[in-house]
Structure formats: C-alpha cells, structure tokens
Amino acid sequence: MRTVLQRADGASVTVDGEVVAAFEGQGLVALVGVTHGDGPQEVATTVRKIAELRILDGERSVLDAGAPVIVVSQFTLHADVRKGRRPSWNAAAPGSVAEPVVAQVCAQLRERGIEVGSGVFGADMRVALVNDGPVTIVLDVPPSQPAG
C-alpha cells in the first residue's frame, strides 16, 4: 500500500460540483493506493502511521491534535512510468479489491476516534488543499509475504 500524506491547512474533495468531504484548519490529506496482496496487515500499519506520525505543528500527531483526515483512493500512485510515455497501471489493485481496503483504512481511523472524510471511490474528484509547510510524506507499506 502506498500513501501520500499531505499536511494541510484546509482541504476539500468535490464530486460533480458537490463537496463530499472538507475540513478547515490543520489536518491531513491521505492519498491511498492499493496494490495486489494488500490486506489487513497493510491496512493496520497504514492506519497507525496516519494516526500517529508526528507531522503536525508542535510535532503532534493527528491523534494528539484531534485533527481530521481526508482519505482519497488513488490508484495512480502505483503507476509504472519506466517505459515509454504511457503509464502502466498493472501494479494497482482492481477496484473490486481496492475499494474495500480503502474503506477499511477509513473505518479503522474512525475506530481510533479520528474525524474522517473521504472521496468517492472511482469518481472524478477535485481535491483542493493548502499544503502546510509544505509537508508531504510518501508512506510505502509493502504487501506481506505469505508464511513459508
């Protein structure tokens, strides 16, 4: 699972002219890309990092600050651009696999008491944010290897 975390001073997600998620003040925007083999372990690690990384003002985490998070599914994070001019999306999990994984990220963040907004899976979204700092972190959690 690959996640790009952006510390923001206000953010929103708009679909078909309607704001579906937004926050004012400091929070995080998490662009989450799911690859083949991502499951419960990758979700748990990603959620822990989103919730606990001390990247907000005063070296506080989202949990420390009571800050919101917007989660947006982003299959393009797994683009392979090594050859030619057209990205390959082969490393991205198909929607039927990725959608429930992203939903689990949102659910587990909420279970930790975090205010979570989200985009609309598969929709053409407009994500707006003021990158604060700027602070942008790429979090790579490789798929777990099967035992044996």
Image (cartoon, rainbow, N blue to C red):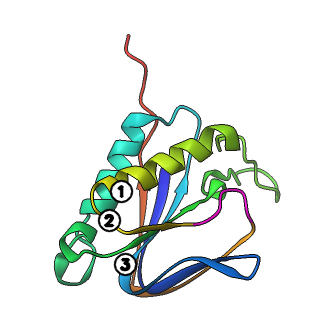
Q: Is residue 9 left or right of residue 129?
A: left
Give yes or no for contact between labels 2 and 1 (Cβ–Cβ under 8 Å). Answer: yes
Q: Secondary structure at mark 2?
A: loop
Circle nearer the N terminus (1, 3)? 3
Q: Which mark is residue 27?
A: 3
Q: Is residue 140 magenta?
A: no
Q: Nearer the viewer, residue 103 or 126?
A: 103
In magenta, the rendered stretch is: 119-123
| Residue at mark 1 | 109
Q: Is residue 94 visible?
A: no
| Residue at mark 2 | 114
- CA–CA distance between discs 3 and 2? 11 Å
- CA–CA distance between discs 1 and 3? 13 Å
Q: Secondary structure at mark 1?
A: helix
Q: Residue at x 31, y 53 (%)?
A: 111
Q: Is residue 92 left or right of residue 64?
A: right
Label 1 vs label 3, nearer the camera: 1
Residue 98 drawn above or below residue 47: above
Q: Label 3 sits on what residue type?
A: Gly
Q: Residues within 10 Å of mark 1 (few under 14, many from 20)?
A: many
Give yes or no for contact between labels 3 and 2 (Cβ–Cβ under 8 Å). Answer: no
